[in-house]
Image: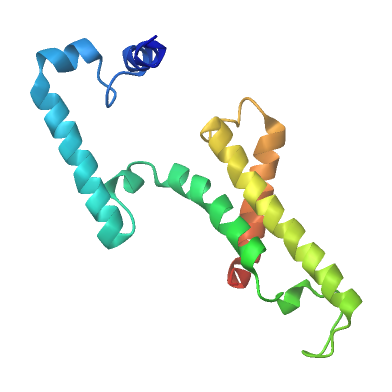
Amino acid sequence: MFSWLKNLRDRIDYHGLFGWKLSYILLRPWVLIKEISYVIKWAFQRMFRGWDDTVVFSLDNYLAKMIPVWIRGIKKYKDGIPMSMFDKDIEMGKETEEDMIKACEKYDKILDDIAEGFEAWTKYDGWFFEENHDDEAKFHKAMNLFMLHFGTFWT
């Protein structure tokens, strides 16, 4: 009947509350108050600054999580293609439809590679260097593409 309550209790027992074991918080309620104050503080920081202090605790992981989101947004909402994506020297405004399609496919592939490489970082929290060399290679390719095409990230 109250299976949802049991599931909630089991989740809290397993994960804790704010990273603290439930029995610890019940004996020390001020810990819960302190944790809730942090959550409220970080929410206000995100509202007024656009980011909160937790970002700098692990900036590499934050960027690796957000860069794919932003890159996919560029791919979805792009309103043009950088001239560097065209295979041959073409005057601006004199591109053919075929040139546009090829350049668009090339740019989409680059954006996908960047997003996938940064997602590979988050999959292993950056510790894949010993475990998975394919994902390590994806990440290094993504970093190189990110550097090479940094000036093209606009919509």
Q: Residue furthest front?
A: 1
In front of the other: 33 or 9: 9
In the image, 59: left or right of 47? Answer: right
Q: Identify whether 15 is placed above or below 36.
A: above
Give percent across and percent down for residue 115: 63, 50
Count of numbered circles on the image: 0
Front residue of this view, candidates 32 and 125: 32
Question: Dividing the picture into quarters, in which one does residue 119 lie?
Answer: top right
Quarter placement of the C terminus: bottom right
User: In the picture provided, is 2 more to the left or to the right than 61?
Assistant: left
Q: Residue at x 20, y 44 (%)?
A: 40
Up the image or down, 140 lies above or below 102; here it is above
The image's colour scheme reads rainbow
Position of 62 with respect to 77 (left or right) is left
Q: Where's residue 153, x and y in %? A: 59, 68
Residue 143, placed above or below residue 32: below
Residue appearing at x 91%, y 75% in the figure:
98
Q: Identify which residue is drawn at 65% across, 62% down.
A: 76
* The quarter of the displayed image where residue 80 is located: bottom right
Residue at figure coordinates x 65%, y 56% from the top left: 144
* Left or right placement of residue 96 versus residue 133 in this view: right
Q: Position of residue 93 (x, y in %)?
A: 79, 90
Location of the N terminus (image quadrant): top left
